[in-house]
Image (cartoon, rainbow, N blue to C red):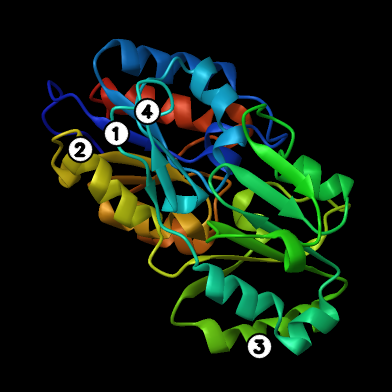
Amino acid sequence: MKLQHLNKKRLILIDLDGTALRKDGQTIHKKTLEVLKKASSEGHTVCIITGRPHRATMRFYKQLGLTSLMTNFDGAHIHDPYKRRFKRVVLPISEQVVFEIINNPIIKQYVTNILIESYNKAFVMKKDEFIENFFHLDDVDDDEYFIADPYENWEGPATNLCLFVSNEDEKDIITRQLEKFKNTVKIQSGNVYGNLSNSSTLMITLTSKIVNKGFVARILAQYYNKDIRDVIAFGDQMNDYEMIKQVGYGVAMKNGTTDLKNVADGITNLTNDEGGLGEYLERLLNGEEV
């Protein structure tokens, strides 16, 4: 793959976990950090599009020195963290549907825990260290985090609903029940949002059906007056699929899924842990055939 028209200032869309972040989910490789900051300083626009909530994204946004729009929950929350000149876009699951799901008698029977999030608050039914760490529930002071019974205390729509289960059989049982809500929610497993370890808890993650990163790529391209064919995007998992297909230069990480690589225009030479995004983007912006 080789960039056409090197003089153009690009919109560069980056996923976090498995892409810009190393496999620890906590650090950006030195090469990736250096190249992304340089791209911004040269007039390119770098935007984060992640499944993470904004509280788990802000420190990387700050580390990269960004002032661009940020997208969280795979597109359910689009906002301008600093300047706040862009009216916040939230694409939620309605309150009615949230309560219909958690009150479904079979779902209620098998879930071990429930996490419900809006763009700035989170409710967890039972305290759980894995859930707190994985979803970064204590990362930002201005977000509200409660350990409380959602059946009694939750109000309003949700950008994210996670159901936790004990085993794969129970996960299948709940997933079958969720077919009743296929017109309003999209069902994903938790591993699209990060690097799960052996200590991970089985989960089913629900977001609004219309939310996907490809949809957001078009919004950001319009906002920054960029032809979608000139946009560069990096991802590693199937929640990046629509984004990689949508843009002109969609790049899958070497450590990414095979299905994503099959639709990508290019594949990084190195993994996320080796600074693959930075190495590939640098060569791309230099006009090299990658």
From the viewer's perspective, tell me whether residue 215 is left or right of residue 104.
left
> Is residue 106 rendered to the left or right of residue 160?
right
Residue visible at 61% across and 50% down in the picture: 193
Dot 2 and dot 1 residues touching (CB under 8 Å): yes
Residue 223's disc number: 2
Task: Please tell me how crowded label 3 is: few (under 14), some (14-19), or many (20+) other residues with Cα within 10 Å.
Answer: some
Q: Earlier in the sequence, mark 2 or mark 1?
A: 1
Type of amino acid under label 2: Tyr
| Alpha-carbon span between mark 1 and mark 3 | 38 Å
Quadrant for residue 166, please give it: bottom right
Residue 165 position (above or below residue 26): below
Please tell me the numbered disc located at residue 281.
4
Q: For residue 231, which quarter of the picture?
A: top left
- Amino acid type at mark 1: Phe
Residue located beneath label 3 in the image: 177
- Element marked by disc 4: helix
Nearest to the eye among marks 1 and 3: give it: 1
Q: State whether residue 105 is above or below residue 269.
A: below
**How far is disc 2 from disc 3 in space, using C-alphas?**
39 Å
Residue type pointed to by label 3:
Gln
Among numbered discs 4 and 2, the one appearing first in the sequence = 2
Q: Which mark is residue 86?
A: 1
Q: Residues within 10 Å of mark 2 (few under 14, many from 20)?
A: few
The first of marks 1 and 3 along the sequence is: 1
Can the viewer see residue 130?
yes
Where residue 76 sits in the image (x, y, percent)? Answer: 44, 53
Q: At label 4, which amino acid type do we have? A: Leu
